[in-house]
């Protein structure tokens, strides 16, 4: 068993490039990196997010919209987040799938469905965390607009299920304990 966990997070300058999509491609370069170290994975991930200026919420509403391939795997993440008392909202396809799994979730309008849609809710600061896995060419435009709105609103977001799972674990850690500070030399003494 490891003595500690280390999570490295890249820092990207998306906030400086208004209108750019935050989905990473092979040409993307980070402007730096941060690392979180803790006795637990959840603590290390939480520290890495704080260091990258992406503070995870402890309460509020979480938006979930994942591609069909990711729907079965997002169930555990949704249950964990819901189990912490956070509200879930999702676009119709994801919401209907989660409801069939017994998870309470409200449907939110897609971008193309008019006022009150997910972008409006993000910009009105009604969403605390965004879980959005890219859905292919048909929804690519909506996905990009949603991620750009999250960036403008300062809402942390994940674009992979592994990051969503790590975020859920980090939120649980943050809710149950204070993150301590320990100098690097103490981890290796």
Image (cartoon, helix red, strand yellow):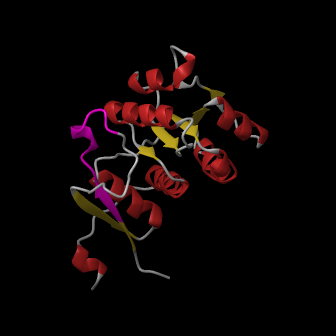
Which residue is drawn at the image coordinates 29% and 52% (left, top)? Answer: 52
Horizontal and vertical percent position of residue 57 = 43, 41
Say which residue appears at 27% left-offset and 50% top-offset.
12
Viewer-proximal residue among 49 and 64: 64
Q: Is residue 60 visible?
A: no
Q: Nearer the viewer, residue 56 or 133?
A: 133
Q: Quadrant of residue 183?
A: bottom left
Residue 137 visible (yes or no): yes
Q: Residue at x 53, y 15 (%)?
A: 114
In-image side of 16 versus 92 (left or right) = left
105 is higher (above) or lower (below) than 74: above
Above or below for 54 versus 19: below
Q: Which residues are magenta?
A: 8-20
Residue, x 66% and y 29% (percent of image)? 92
Q: Residue furthest top?
A: 115
Q: Which image quarter is the C terminus in?
A: bottom left
Q: Does 40 lie within the magenta span?
A: no
Left or right: residue 110 versus residue 36 is: right
């Amino acid at each position: 068993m490891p003595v500690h966990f280390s999570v490295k997070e890249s820092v990207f300058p998306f906030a400086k490039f208004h209108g750019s999509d935050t989905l990473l491609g092979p040409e993307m370069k980070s402007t730096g990196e941060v690392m979180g170290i803790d006795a637990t994975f959840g603590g290390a991930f939480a520290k890495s997010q704080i260091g990258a200026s992406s503070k995870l919420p402890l309460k509020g509403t979480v938006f979930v919209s994942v591609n069909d391939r990711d729907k079965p795997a997002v169930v555990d993440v949704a249950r964990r987040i819901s189990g912490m008392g956070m509200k879930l909202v999702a676009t119709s396809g994801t919401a209907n799938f989660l409801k069939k799994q017994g998870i309470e979730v409200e449907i939110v309008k897609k971008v193309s469905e008019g006022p009150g849609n997910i972008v409006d809710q993000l910009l009105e600061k009604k969403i605390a965390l965004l879980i959005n896995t890219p859905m292919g060419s048909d929804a690519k435009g909506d996905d990009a607009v949603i991620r750009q709105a999250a960036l403008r609103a300062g809402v942390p977001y994940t674009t992979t299920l592994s990051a969503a799972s790590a975020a859920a674990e980090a939120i649980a850690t943050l809710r149950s304990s204070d993150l301590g500070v320990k100098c690097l030399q103490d981890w290796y003494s």
